[in-house]
Image (cartoon, helix red, strand yellow):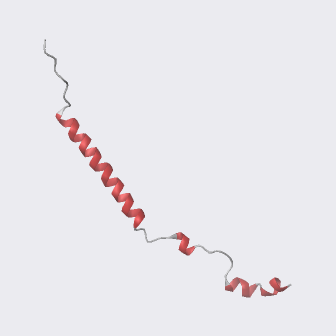
Amino acid sequence: MATSTSLPAPGASRTGFAKIIAELRVFWRQFFTRAFNPYRPELHYMRGPGPAWRAKHRSRLRS
């Protein structure tokens, strides 16, 4: 008696290929979105009071 190996259904490999393509598209879209994002909050983060605050509170700072 001969045994046969089960082959994947013809549509199964195509859906697997489509799934891989979809995952690659999502990966590259997210990569380019993050890599070339013009907003960089660390460049705009204030690290303390500025000159206007110092001028306004100068009398308190000296005492």
Residue occupying the far left of the picture: 1
Where residue 55 sits, quadrant-wise, is bottom right
Question: Closer to the camera, 59 or 6?
Answer: 6
Residue at x 73%, y 84% (from the top left corner): 54
- Most extreme residue toward the top, as rendered? 1
Residue 37, position as x, y percentages in the image? 42, 68
Could you tell me which residue is drawn at 67 percent across and 76 percent down?
A: 48
Quarter that holds the N terminus: top left
- Choose top left, top right, bottom left or bottom right for residue 17: top left
Q: Is residue 32 above or below residue 13?
A: below
Give left or right: position of 62 versus 43: right
- Position in image of residue 28 (x %, y %): 34, 57
Residue visible at 50% across and 70% down in the picture: 40
* Relative image position of residue 5 (x, y in whole percent): 18, 23
Q: Is residue 4 left or right of residue 36?
A: left
**Residue 34 higher or lower than 17, as above or below:** below
Q: Is residue 62 left or right of residue 29?
A: right
Does residue 33 sit above or below 19 in this rendering?
Answer: below
Identified at 68% across, 85% down, the residue is: 52
x, y percent for residue 35: 41, 65
Task: Report the quarter where the C terminus lies.
Answer: bottom right
